[in-house]
Image: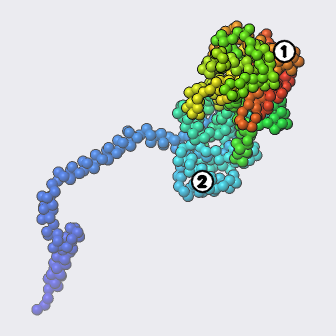
Amino acid sequence: MKSDPFALYSKNYIKDTSVRSSTKNFLIDGAPPEQSISRPDKMQKFSQQFPIKYLFIIAVIFFGVIVLRVFFLQIVQGANYRKQAEGNRVQIHRTSALRGVIYDANGKLLVKNVPNFRLIIYGRDIQYPSQANLQTAAFRIAQITKLDTAVIKEDLQTSFNSGQPIVLEEHISYDKAMRLMIDTQNIAGVRLEIAYSREYLTREEYGPVLGYTGQMTEEELNNKKQENKDYLPTDDLGKTGIEKAYEDQLKGGDGKQEIEVDFQGREQAILSDTAPLAGANIHLTINSNLQQALYNALKKVVDEQNFPGASAVAMNPQNGKILSLVSYPAYDSNLFAQGISQENYQKLTEDKKQPLFNRVISGQFPSGSVFKPIVAGAALEEHVIDINTTFVSTGGITVGGSIFPDWKTGGHGVTNVIKGLAESVNTFFYYIGGGDNEGMTGLGVERITDYAKKFGLGENTGIDLFGEKPGFLPSKEWKEEFKNESWYLGDTYHLAIGQGDILVTPLQVASYTSIFANGGTYYQPHVVDYITNQKNETTTVIEPMIKNTQVISQESINIVRQGMQAAVLVGSAKKLQSLPVSAGAKTGTAQFGNEDKSHAWFTVFAPYDNPQIVLTILIEEGGEGSVTALPIAEQILQDYFSSAKTPTN
């Protein structure tokens, strides 16, 4: 039987079709035919166990989270992120204001500003501060500047973390600055800027008065932020003296530039530019001629006789203006203006003669006999004595087996208050201060210290300089508490002649000498006369500030003045008779320690009838005031009143 070719073809076709159908089912369902047959049953079972509504809830929660996240990013944090994005496009550069300058009383320039090229790191400009990027940037900067790579990298990281600029190098020479300006222009985060540093046109004679500026510490920066003051870590700040006391006036207001940059931090355009406002100029009450003369005189005596130090202050008793303020040894402010090395700074701080210490306002010393005018005034005011009261000085007094001597062997004879001041008679002041064992009642410690406070002792005078000390006035309570001892009559005797535990500053002595000079008015001392702007227009005048219009009665003041005049005419200050004007004065020899050493004091006012100057001098360990300090005062006042160039403030 012949086979049918068509039938054979049909049979094979049918067979192939079944295979393809099976394959098709496998490919469509993703499983062998026998598995796909059971799938509808499993889906039905799953849908029964996990209803569709749960899937809907999950979807709602999922999309809700997304919506909340978008809301948080765009609405809650939107302003912050927009600000950051803008910061990536716009950078704010500050332009330092020109600091105000300082003049003396005659208009002589004492300090000026000089350009200072500085290389500054701005970590905020680094787009991707990875360790690799920081290392690369540090290496490039080190190649250009010849500075240490590790230090630069650390500064870059610190600046980025804090968001604050860091001065990498300053006081760069002009030639080097021009090279750095070119070499660093394509390095993000590094800029060469022009600031200004101080140049002091004086030397050591003005150091304690002018002070100096220096870069801010972290603590100082935090303090300025708390005061809402606009400072950056790269700013200079007044550290001492006038620079510190008048920081707010001298600083001025910085300018600001908004600069558009590309993604690499390169400048594209200046969007806005606010010019800086220069600081105010300070005009001092100090006369440079007098300042230099006093400095030279103190330096000579200290250096030649190897004394620890000396100080002097001159003031106008009619208004409290400081005419001169000298502390020696001193320092040159330019050492700090150019950035003092650690080695040189350590030399200054470890120097036993303390050149950084302003002795005039911060030095606290036993007063010795320059305290006696206050005791005399108190005794007159309290009617313990009058101008006719006398005591006999035979060389000292003895109480309870203790001897309290006069400085003159054999004593001074019959003594009243005028002679007591003129010759500095200790016995007279023992009696009026503490009385005696025979029924006479003296002032006592309480009344002595009460009047001392009226004359400004035991507290700051309020001078417009930082670092003033109040001195110290002892009391019975203080001695019992801190020394665990009772107060004895001998303690009152010592206090009455300015010995024992009493401490005063040279400024305080000059201040209360001015009270006697002008007839009883207590003026607050000050070193700044007036302030001007950059147009030389006076913006502020420092008016005399009266702390007390009449400390003690005019009558008592006049008697003390007569005693101080007698010191010049017939007493311990007779050397001043050579002056072209009359004067009133008081010498002082203040013993201290257990080595029989003493400080030499001298305070004077002149002319006697219309005082224009008070001069107080202290020579540490200088011995007798009439021997060491008085000759300096004589020399200074001789020149002061003989010079036609010397103005009266």
Q: Which residue is mark 1?
A: 569
Answer with the quarter of the image where residue 644 lies.
top right
Classify mark 2: helix, strand or loop.
helix
Q: Earlier in the sequence, mark 2 or mark 1?
A: 2
Residue 85, image x, y percentages: 48, 43
Q: Residue 20, can we see it?
A: yes
State the quadrant of the C terminus.
top right
423, above or below 80, in the image: above
Is 407 situated left or right of 26 in this image? Answer: right
Is 133 situated left or right of 175 in this image? Answer: left
Query: Residue at point 72% right, 14% down?
Result: 516
- Disc 2, disc 1: CB below 8 Å? no
Query: Residue at point 69% right, 28% down?
Result: 402
Q: Which residue is mark 2?
A: 153
Count neighbours of disc 2 (C-alpha within 10 A) and say few if under 14, some if 14 to 19, many if 20 or more: many
Query: Residue at point 84% right, 15% down?
Result: 569
Q: Which mark is residue 77?
A: none
